[in-house]
Image: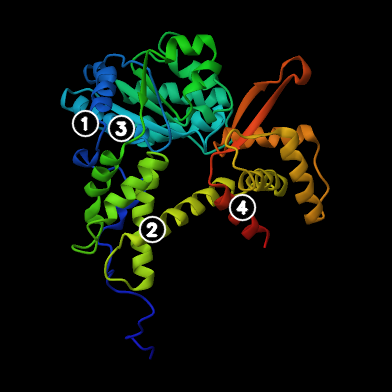
């Protein structure tokens, strides 16, 4: 008989009481959404006609990562569905993560599958195997068969490979693709300049209303974390822990996701060290761990040379006090040295430029154009947006 008193597993968590409240994908209740009252009201006003079965405005939301864009869009959409139901209007919303569903076919399949009730419509939406046009035809039939109004949330809309789905969705009613159902699109982007590269026809129909979500300040971040403090057991959070985490996050980025990550990691550090409380000193360790884990996730699956290029930029950043970035040619020189040390053939300068563009697209680095006048011509500088020590440590660790 096995020993039932085996203490390999902890039966009662001494730190957390409801850790789910600190998960990024957790959608909090109304009382837990802090510092976004104006944004929620503005967004609700834009889609308000939907509760009467009328067409909601199409909306584009901008703001840095962790400023509550997706949270507020999902919250307002769910409230709209509930309120419309009270008016006998059948409404729903579909959420698409465009960082995952980057192609038109993937996105329209996700939408159709998300809103379809096959026992009602008799329509099947397979994961793959259909043409894009067939997915659209099934989506239009599903919408007209089931709903009066549907909101489509396209998160990280700038990750879409092209604007084709935006054209289809924003003009579906006008083009006669749907007759009974009204359709609204909420596009969400981390890039304020995203609109500049949109097709003019899409821009005119999609950007009926635009909202910018600013970063959170220290007071708002503190309120956000305090609103989720019941994730912890009573009395385990030291009084200075949340203020310290809020101040650190506000100074660096104003990102609520990162702030909540830091708080969760601080709790896990307390847990792993056997501490009885989550102390302020754990916040600094948690911040380092959160940054490291986030960067690991960003580069997961990237190629060795993609990593060598980032490593080159990290080395340059750590060896210089300059903050304005480094020219492509200088990055390439250090990249060549790294390849030599790894016993790897170098890629061409042009290919390294492409890799740098890919990192800029993922917001790992920032690129800026400069003019050197008639003598030098124009050139590009590259600057890490991540902590260069974190970048170097993670990339060196992966090599090891």
Alpha carbon distance from label 3 to label 2: 25 Å
Q: Say which label, 4 or 1, has the lower sequence index.
A: 1
Rendered image quadrant of residue 365: top right
Q: Which residue is mark 3?
A: 72
| Residue bearing the label numbered 4 | 392
The residue sitting at 45% across, 19% down in the picture is 169
Q: Residue at x 35, y 25 (%)?
A: 151
Q: Is residue 50 visible?
A: no
Taking the image as shown, residue 86 lies to the left or right of residue 310, namely left
Q: Which image quadrant: the C terminus?
A: bottom right
Front of the two marks 4 and 1: 4
Mark 3 vs mark 4: which is more N-terminal? 3
Residue on which the image places disc 2: 265
Q: Nearer the viewer, mark 3 or mark 2?
A: 2
Name the N-terminal-most of marks 1 and 2: 1
**Mark 4 and mark 1: Cα distance apart in space:** 48 Å
Q: Position of residue 35 (x, y in %)?
A: 25, 34
Q: Which residue is mark 1?
A: 82
User: Residue 148: in sight, yes or no?
Assistant: yes
Residue 274 locus on image (x, y percent): 34, 73
Of the pair 288 and 69, the residue shown nearer to us: 288
Dot placed on the residue nearer the N-terminal end, 1 or 3: 3
**Residue 280 appears at what percent x and percent y?**
31, 59
For marks 3 and 2 on the same chain, the one whose residue lies earlier in the sequence: 3
């Amino acid at each position: 008989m096995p020993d039932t008193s085996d203490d390999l597993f902890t039966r009662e968590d001494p730190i957390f009481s409801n850790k789910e409240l600190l998960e990024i994908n957790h959608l909090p209740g109304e009382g837990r959404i802090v510092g976004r009252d104006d944004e929620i009201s503005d967004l609700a006003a834009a889609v308000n006609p939907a509760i009467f079965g009328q067409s909601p405005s199409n909306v584009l939301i901008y703001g840095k990562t962790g400023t509550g864009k997706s949270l507020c869009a999902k919250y307002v959409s769910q409230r709209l569905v509930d309120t419309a139901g009270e008016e006998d209007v059948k409404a729903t919303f579909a959420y698409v993560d465009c960082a995952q569903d980057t192609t038109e076919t993937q996105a329209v399949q996700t939408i159709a599958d998300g809103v379809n009730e096959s026992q009602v419509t008799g329509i099947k939406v397979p994961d793959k195997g259909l043409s894009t046009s067939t997915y659209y035809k099934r989506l239009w039939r599903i919408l007209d068969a089931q709903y009066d109004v549907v909101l489509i949330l396209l998160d990280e809309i700038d990750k879409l490979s092209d604007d084709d789905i935006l054209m289809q969705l924003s003009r579906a009613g006008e083009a006669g693709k749907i007759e009974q159902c009204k359709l609204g699109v909420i596009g969400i982007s981390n890039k304020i300049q995203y609109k500049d590269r949109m097709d003019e026809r899409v821009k005119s129909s999609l950007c009926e209303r635009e909202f910018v979500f600013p970063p959170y300040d220290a007071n708002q971040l503190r309120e956000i974390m305090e609103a989720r403090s019941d994730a912890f057991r009573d009395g385990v959070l030291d009084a200075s822990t949340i203020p310290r985490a809020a101040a650190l996050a506000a100074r660096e980025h104003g990102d609520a996701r990162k702030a909540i990550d830091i708080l969760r990691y601080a709790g896990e550090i307390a847990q792993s060290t056997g501490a009885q409380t989550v102390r302020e000193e754990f916040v600094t360790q948690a911040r380092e761990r959160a940054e490291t884990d986030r960067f690991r996730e960003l580069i997961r699956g990237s190629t060795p040379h993609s990593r060598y290029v980032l490593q080159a930029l990290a080395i340059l950043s750590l060896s210089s006090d300059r903050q304005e970035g480094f020219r492509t040619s200088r990055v390439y020189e250090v990249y060549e040295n790294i390849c030599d040390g790894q016993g790897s053939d170098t890629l061409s300068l042009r290919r390294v430029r492409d890799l740098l563009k890919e990192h800029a697209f993922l917001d790992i680095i920032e690129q800026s154009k400069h003019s050197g006048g008639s003598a030098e011509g124009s050139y590009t500088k590259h600057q890490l947006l991540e902590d260069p020590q974190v970048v170097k440590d993670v990339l060196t660790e992966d090599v090891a």
